[in-house]
Image (cartoon, rainbow, N blue to C red):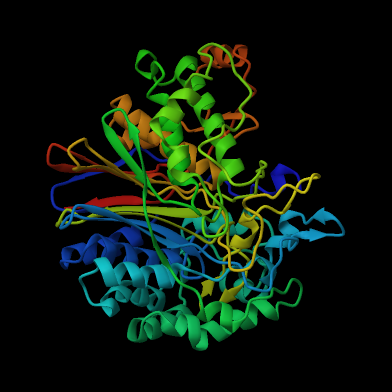
Amino acid sequence: MQAEAEVQPEITTGRTAIKSATAERYMAVTANPHASAAAAQMLADGGTAVDAAIAAQLVLGLVEPQSSGIGGGAFILSYRADDKTLYSYDGRETAPMAVDESYFVRDGKPLGFLQAVIGGYSVGVPGVMRVMALAHERDGKLPWKDLFQPAIQLAEDGFAISPRLYQLADKLPRVAARPAIRDYLFGDDGKPLPVGHTLKNPAYAATLKLLAEKGAAPFYEGEIAEAIVDAVRNDPVNPGVMTLQDMASYKAKVREPVCSEFFEYRVCGAAAPSSGGTTVGAILGMLQHLPTQQFDVGSAALTHLFVEASELAFADRNTYAGDSDFVEVPTDALVAPHYLAQRAKLINLEKAQPARSGVPGELAGQRIKAKSPEMPNTSHLSIVDQYGNAVSMTTSIETGFGSRLLVKGFLLNNQLTDFSFVPRNADKALVANRVQPGKRPRSSMSPTIVFNSDGSLRLVVGSPGGSRIIDYTARTILYHLAKGMPIAEAIHAGNIGAIGYRVEVEPEVLSDKELDKLEAMGHKVVRRELNSGIHGIALQDGKLYGGADTRREGSAVGR
């Protein structure tokens, strides 16, 4: 595996002042003002939260192509106010049927990340179109074709390249590795098109017009599917094995949400193959058994408790999480109150402890820990509509600009690299997240919806950030619900990353004095910017309070 610096391509692109909004009827918070405007337009036209989410996603794939799009996958939590039920839709990509568990092993050694990621070899069957069609069929209200109009118009008229898109195109490794993306985003001088340049995408507009008219079918069985498979299989350097049958057989799934306790609240997230629901729930479930109320935000003591809970939760995640259609995932046991109470007892209030996985329930087979190089280039949107419905949607093409394959105006994902590159250990024990035909890679995407004790909506939240998504989401919930910070301030507050090998804190998290205290507890601490994209909506006193992450270019819009 390559050095960490080479497999962490996301970069920071600056911070802004706190971005917040207050509304009474509806609100949308997304990663780009164009997407927020599209979502708000659907809400103003009487659409549901799902309608608005689809319109926003189609725009994000245009203006924020490095992070998400119809060539990727997504998890959608959809709360329906009419039956007071939360639904979880799984649009995660799948591995082609021709792969095997040694797909990322060459000559007995795992491939380097960039060696694997660029080109057709890393592309999974995209799920975004199928999952959006599924969600719209069940929870939408506006005509399907209407949801495409904002993105089509923007693709035809063009949009100004933002500072963030320019910086990522300029600084991420090997963005222009293939001719189509090079011709789209770069000038004749080989440099990225400048900030403010009007970028048009007629190919994407044509794709969206076809999908608006005929639904998702052409993406999976028609000319779009053929173009995707051709790009994957005929990549000149790193071809993949996807077939038209892989595309045609893709299905989005309805899964049972994962819900857990956090004080008087019910915290719900996506189930496997997402590890977000169980791991966010585990962190918060342990913290409620610890003296979190005694310590202030910014103290070494509270940071220590969060770090220890996170590392215990990640030890379980890295051991047990995978696609539950292929491996046994002890979902309920991982967030069971009695189990988390026992895990919390392992936390020493004054000293860092090594984090080991527990035994949540009865397991059929032996498991070993395994990591995968999950990249932080993802997007999250949170929406509440005038009917009381809500959507928390996290969507991704994995690393920045995905596989670098641009097809019919959109980028293809590299999500197969979210599988463990190593299928077994030296004793031949199986890794839960190993590559298998038709399998969905483990994800850290953590769309989350929190309910009050009476079942009413309290918070809609989530973030991009690779495996750090889990910490970003859990920290925001902790600061807002347990420490009383307004949602926009909780989002803006310094991030903490504790995913198993060191503690990362943004510079403003701890003073020098508190940092010394944390290190004295035995933690190896690194100060660095942690580029989240947390977007949330809090419901309090009959109003909607939105916050967009100041680390990205998003916005909160409501009425």
User: Is the residue 547 above or below the residue 559 in the image?
Assistant: above
Is 450 drawn above or below residue 414 in the view shown? above
Residue 44 in view: yes
> Residue at the spot x=20%, y=56% of the render?
385
Q: Position of residue 207 (x, y in %)?
A: 44, 82
Q: Is residue 411 left or right of residue 302?
A: right
Task: Kindly identify the residue that appears in the image at 52 percent across and 26 percent down.
Answer: 307
Which of the 4 quarters of the picture holds residue 54?
bottom left
| Figure check: 270 above or below 125 | above
Image location (x, y in percent) of residue 318:
60, 42
Q: Is residue 221 left or right of residue 99?
A: left
Comparing 376 with 387, the one in front is 387
Relative image position of residue 287 (x, y in whole percent): 42, 25
Please name the residue shown 47% across and 81% down the image.
219
Q: Please indicate whether residue 482 sits to the left or right of residue 287 in the image.
A: left
Q: Residue furthest bottom?
A: 223
- The image position of residue 438, as x and y in percent, is 58, 68
